Image (spheres, rainbow, N blue to C red):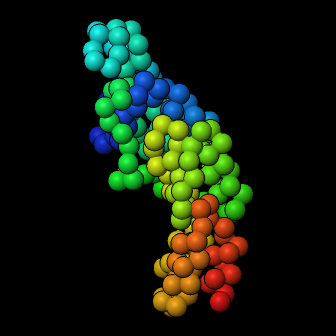
């Protein structure tokens, strides 16, 4: 048996941690399900023998999904930020989350059907915000503020002025 990762993100789910982990594994690179552990006894959220925890990795980040029941609801305080290289990759991840029961938000944010928040963030946008010319960074930022899913061509147009 291998030692657990020194630092692991634990995400709370209402009974469907395995479905979430399998969706992430099918959607994002370097993502996979490692193990499903069943509850050794009845507890408030699971019956004996039902999946209690799921070990998985999302884009190289070790996670544990805990089927803890409906008591905890995710919020914006935690999100996965996914740096994308081009519009096709941006569209692929955004659409995968939205088309699988998720919700679109603004400025590159969306939420999957399990309540986990995601920032689908093109590298072109990140670089525009870091531009030493504050006027360029401001134009890119103001363009982003009008978007749901990020439109890289519109960010690049804002950079050009």
The answer to whether residue 26 is left or right of residue 13 is: right
Instruction: From this view, report whether residue 79 is shown above or below residue 150.
Output: above
Residue beneath the point at 34% across and 8% down: 48
Residue beneath the point at 28% across and 18% down: 44
The answer to whether residue 90 is left or right of residue 14 is: right
Q: Taking the image as drawn, is residue 12 in sight? A: yes
The percent coordinates of residue 130 (x first, y second) are 48, 79
Residue beneath the point at 59% across and 39% down: 101
Instruction: From this view, report whether residue 133 is shown above or below residue 21.
Output: below
Which of the pair 106/124 is nearer the observer?
Answer: 106
Instruction: From this view, report whether residue 132 is shown above or below residue 88.
Output: below
Residue beneath the point at 59% across and 62% down: 148
The percent coordinates of residue 31 (x first, y second) are 54, 39
**Number of marks:** 0
Q: Taking the image as drawn, is residue 82 in sight? A: no
Q: Quadrant of residue 9?
A: top left
Q: Please identify the quadrant where the N terminus is shown.
A: top left
Instruction: From this view, report whether residue 150 is shown above or below residue 155.
Output: above
The percent coordinates of residue 133 (x first, y second) are 51, 91
Which of the pair 145/21 is nearer the observer?
Answer: 145
The percent coordinates of residue 18 (x first, y second) are 49, 26
Q: Please identify the quadrant where the C terminus is shown.
A: bottom right
């Amino acid at each position: 048996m291998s030692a657990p990762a020194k630092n692991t993100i634990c995400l709370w789910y209402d009974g469907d941690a395995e479905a979430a982990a399998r969706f992430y594994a099918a959607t994002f690179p370097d993502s996979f399900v490692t193990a499903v552990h069943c509850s050794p006894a009845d507890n408030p959220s699971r019956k004996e023998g039902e999946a209690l925890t799921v070990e998985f990795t999302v884009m190289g980040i070790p996670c544990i999904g805990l089927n803890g029941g409906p008591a905890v609801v995710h919020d914006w305080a935690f999100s996965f930020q996914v740096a994308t290289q081009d519009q096709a990759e941006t569209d692929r991840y955004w659409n995968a989350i939205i088309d699988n029961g998720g919700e679109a938000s603004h400025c590159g944010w969306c939420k999957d059907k399990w309540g986990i928040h995601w920032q689908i963030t093109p590298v072109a946008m990140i670089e525009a915000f870091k531009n030493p010319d504050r006027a360029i960074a401001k134009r890119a930022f103001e363009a982003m503020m009008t978007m749901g899913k990020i439109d890289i061509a519109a960010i690049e147009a804002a950079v050009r002025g």
